[in-house]
Image: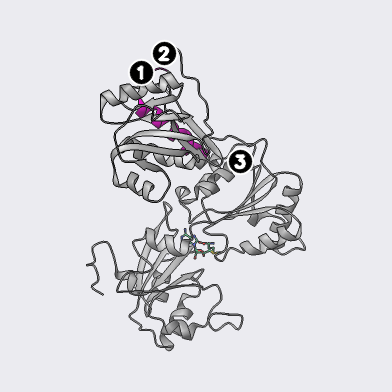
Amino acid sequence: MAEHPAYPVGLRLTGRRVVVLGGGQVAQRRLPALIAAGADVLLVSPEATPSVEAMADAGEITWQQRPYAQGDLADAWYALIATGDAEANTAASAEAERHRVWCVRSDDADRATAWTPATGHSEGVTVAVLTTDAKGRDPRHTAAIRDAVVEGLRDGTLVAPHHRTRTPGVALVGGGPGDPDLITVRGRRLLAEADVVITDHLGPRDLLAELSPSVEVIDAAKLPFGRFMAQEAINDALIEHARKGKSVVRLKGGDPFVYGRGMEEVQALAEAGIPCTVVPGISSSISVPGAAGIPVTHRGVAHEFTVVSGHIAPDDERSLVDWPSLAKLTGTLVILMGVSTIGKVAETLIAHGKSPDAPVALIQEGTTAGQRRVDATLATVAETVRTEDVKPPAVIVIGEVVKVGPTAPAPRK
Ligand SMILES: C[S@@+](CC[C@H](N)C(=O)[O-])C[C@H]1O[C@@H](n2cnc3c(N)ncnc32)[C@H](O)[C@@H]1O
């Protein structure tokens, strides 16, 4: 039987009886996929692992708590034979052969009439990897091939363009704080499939180097905007390329909706009737402090964190931030775009009751090779920014969490 390669096929099991003999580890591993395929699973086994038992309790499978008996496979379309009893396995296998039921055997692949491939999924595609013959079976190798293919599809390093379903339009992708590994799997895949990428100076710029030479990369900062505002020029470019039938990715630093003007772009696209997908990203407001060893919350230390834009100083009449109220909060303040205004911010917070000794950390170029952290207090931060020459982009964290680190004792509260 094993002289020829196995013939790969996808079984459509919805509502069809699948018999599983044995409720151990093999069943535990295989049952979720059978349940997901909609199979009507009958488990025959005197015992089951707690996870398998939970599937029976939840009504996902029917469990007959007894050993295998002749006739169990009569109504089966497919069987998984995985008892710990070699005699029962052989008898069940013979029954499967008589009834022409394809069957997998966990104890003897050579005698099985079907093999379970190593499977994985990526965006509507199932990748199934089978070994060619039973003698050369190396399940770890097939699993490794499956992993390589699925991972490559997910992170975009293996590019398989969609020909049927790809619709032109714009994907607004949050690229994360800068480290190319911190973009989402979906974001990376869309980037790999794009015809045009419109990018900013923030975010994972290293990813752009991986794009195929056929991809047009447009630096949003360099768009000529003539009579337009810069944002209108970006909206215009998105619309223009999408109307040409291109797949456009608008790549942004962090998350598109955290000081990213993402919704303005979504609105402009909606007005132009262009389909738009939003892919969230890891915001620098949480990840950059984290990368520098600062948790934005910590049990017993800070029960809230507030993210504030510092791009407008507190004494500027355009400011929408209620700084006096922020001074009264006991949790963590995270300030973005605040390097140039931190002196005025610190003064205002102190004037409204925040302790001048409140710890402050500034993290510049977080998660990139250039990351650096500079610590200060509210009283000293303006001077520290000058003497240490802290430059944007930087995230500023104010609060007791700055002093919490991997070696700090666990809080009691
Ligand atoms: C226009 S806001 C965009 C924020 C972005 N949408 C996000 O969710 O992270 C830009 C500010 O984010 C912060 N920022 C973004 N990436 C950073 C990084 N890698 N290191 C430090 N700060 C960063 C800086 O405060 C910077 O001035």
Left-right relation of 216 to 294: right
Residue 193: image tag: 3
- Residue annotated with mark 2: 1
Amino acid type for the residue under numbered disc 3: Glu
Q: Is mark 3 within 8 Å of ligand 1?
A: no
Secondary structure at badge 1 equals helix
Determine the CA span between mark 3 and mark 2.
Answer: 42 Å
- Residue annotated with mark 1: 110
- The answer to if 144 sits in the magenta stretch is yes
Instruction: Residue at 35% x, 49% y: name it.
Output: 54
Q: Position of residue 256 (x, y in %)?
A: 57, 60
Instruction: Verify CB contact (< 8 Å) between mark 1 and mark 3.
Output: no
Determine the CA span between mark 1 and mark 3.
Answer: 41 Å
User: Is the residue 347 above or below the residue 62 in the image?
Assistant: below
Q: Which residues make up the magenta segment?
A: 133-153
- Callout in the foreground (3, 2): 2
